[in-house]
Amino acid sequence: MPRFLPSFYIFLFLLVAAAFICMAGPCETAASDVDSIIFKGADYLYKEQLEKAEKCFKEAVRLDPKNEFAHNKLGIVYAKQMRFDDAFKEFLLVTKLDGKNTFAHKMIGILYLKKGEMNLAFDRFNSIVKIDPNNADAYYFIGAIYNFRHNQAKAIEYLKKARDAASHEADTHYRLAKAFHNADMVENAMLEYQRALEIKPAYTKALNEIGWIYYNRGDPDKAISAWKKTLKINNRDRDAVYNIAKAYNDLALNAAKSGNRAEAIKYWKKVISINPGNKAAKYYLNKMLPG
Amino acid sequence: MHRRYFLKLLSKGAFASLGFLSCFSYLRAEDSLEYALKGQDLIQKKRYKDAIAVLKKAIAADPKSDWAFGLLGRAYLGDDKKAESVAAFREAVRLNPDDSYSRMVIEKITQKPIPRIKDKKRPLTPLESSAHMEEASMLKRIRSKKGLGYQLRRVVIDAGHGGFDSGAVGPSGLKEKDVTLDLALRLDQKLKQSGRIKSFLTRSGDYYVPLSDRTVTANQFQADLFVSLHINANQKRSAKGSETYFCSEKASSAEAHKVAALENSVLKFDEPYKKKPGYIDIEEILFKFEQTLYWNESSRFAEVFQQKLESHLPFKSRGVHSANFYVLRRAKMPSILLETGFVSNPEEEAVLKQPGFREKIANSIAMGLL
Ligand SMILES: [Zn+2]
């Protein structure tokens, strides 16, 4: 073995080292303790600076390979970068470090769902509620899966558990409302849609469903006003546009059937004002209006 | 982790690390500031219980102080009251979404199980009481059905075309819209007689219903299945038989693509759904998953229907296909489209005119449903 490396090799080494530092450079923080590095990483993550966040969390797990939080955060960064296999590995590692890390279990379940592995996801969420009987998210996903499996009673049971464990989740109230609605339990559906709206007034999906409850009760005016509320929040909400168009179309057709021409024209004009491309309204208006 | 919080955290853009800027706002609540400083001092001395008491006063003096809530979170954490700590940090983040530190601490604590804070009891509102009563009676009924597997309860029957849109027209003038309406009315009657499935029609007469309205009807009634009835047509008069379609992103064949194009032709497509890149939305994952499930279920329904049509009708079976049908795409439930025969084929047109034959078609579809 030569006593001195030829200068060419030294140069090559430096080049490679420099390239390595540029590529996988350290976390951009003056601090060197793991907690500060993790905080810096989290801050980058919240700012959507994923590459910088990745560097910090990688640095953190290098310094402290058993840091579950750093591994979880690294998993989130990977998931956000669409590197789902890498993310999966991080979360799996966390569950090996501590089987009680329910966050990692939950993310594994979600990644299973993303892959279309409903049964594996279901088992994973069930394992979470065994560890933590208060885990609202796990109940939520189990409830959603029961719904996918058309098991209404179980869907309602688990979504209620999710609601009771964390009553401030608009999505939970909405999904529970849908399950009730689907089971013809309209009072409960209404209550849960309203709760979703209390938490998130811009929850247009809930407004749209409330509209149908009114409509099916024979109150098109209240229905239309619910859908118009949706349009105030998002004027391009296609469900609301089509729902209103349908309601006015129905009113117009009924008016036409009972010989009330003026009323029919009025409603078809309303259809056009909300949905200018509506072929039915266009056609009938053309037919009814002279010229 | 808190799901809503998790979503927010994944989607939010710029955050400043700690709320330095908002510090100025504390000046107007001098008492609060004073208490908070005292609290901070007590935390440093590890006198967490005292710190909690003082910080509660700080919050009482200024309930909008995210800084005081953040300190309270730290004090609770020091006192090993994790649930209370998380609640305080959440309030800090709610008041100041740029508070990365509080966000991170919440995530760190909630990685693992924490005890729960019990909600306070309060009297029920009228809607809550009626909901309770409804639940008691309905849930019993639903539970008694447990184990019976997937049961269709609500079906929306869509008679294709109508009004000025005749659909395909046969060589001797038979219109697709008239056949589909007659089939739909017959099928609706059969389902109503069975008493097992509630059925709804997208149209009950010869008038035009826009494609968007048809799926809206399915969504209106929370239907479990949407069945759209059509009669096929082809430039080649020899083309014949029945086929069933379900919705898929890509057509299963060039022929299937053509059929979808023909059925879609009455409308110009809406702009496709735009998605934000780099955004993990759990509801989106669930939605996608649900849609895939619907499409899989649709394909199973399509197989069943095609089999019934094949064994009960003298039509040649052209099998099951998939394509991107607008009328199916917007349905929030499994949905299929049946093409029972070719109106362009003189022989099939002749049988499609016969009420007895239509009855047979309606019967075989009903058999697929019941
Ligand atoms: Zn057609």
Image: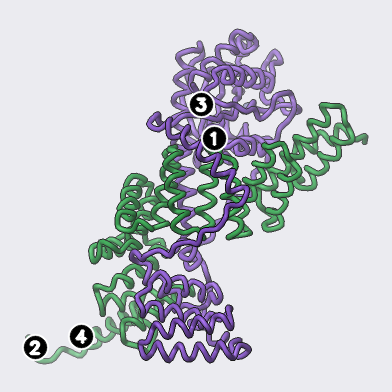
The quadrant the N terminus of chain B occupies is bottom left
Q: Nearer the viewer, mark 4 or mark 3?
A: 3
Q: Which residue is mark 4?
A: A9
Chain of the residue on which disc 4 is drawn: A
* Residue B44 shown left or right of residue B237 in the figure: left
Q: Nearer the viewer, mark 4 or mark 1?
A: 1
Question: Residue at the location (48% across, 82% down)?
Answer: B17
* Residue A252 shown left or right of residue B362 in the figure: right
Q: Which residue is mark 2?
A: A2
For badge 4, the amino acid type reads Tyr
Question: Residue at the location (33% across, 65% down)?
Answer: B112
Question: Residue at the location (70% across, 13% down)?
Answer: B172
For badge 2, the amino acid type reads Pro
Q: Position of residue B42 (x, y in %)?
A: 41, 89
Chain seen in green: A
Chain of the residue on which disc 1 is drawn: B
Above or below B264: residue B49: below
Chain seen in purple: B
Gap in angstroms between the C-alphas marked 4 and 1: 62 Å
Gap in angstroms between the C-alphas marked 4 and 3: 70 Å
For badge 1, the amino acid type reads His
Q: Which residue is mark 3?
A: B244
- Disc on the earlier residue, 1 or 3: 3
- Disc on the earlier residue, 4 or 2: 2
Q: Position of residue A280 (x, y in %)?
A: 76, 35
Above or below B363: residue A23: below
Q: Position of residue B341 (x, y in %)?
A: 57, 18
Q: Which residue is mark 1?
A: B257
Q: Nearer the viewer, mark 2 or mark 3?
A: 3
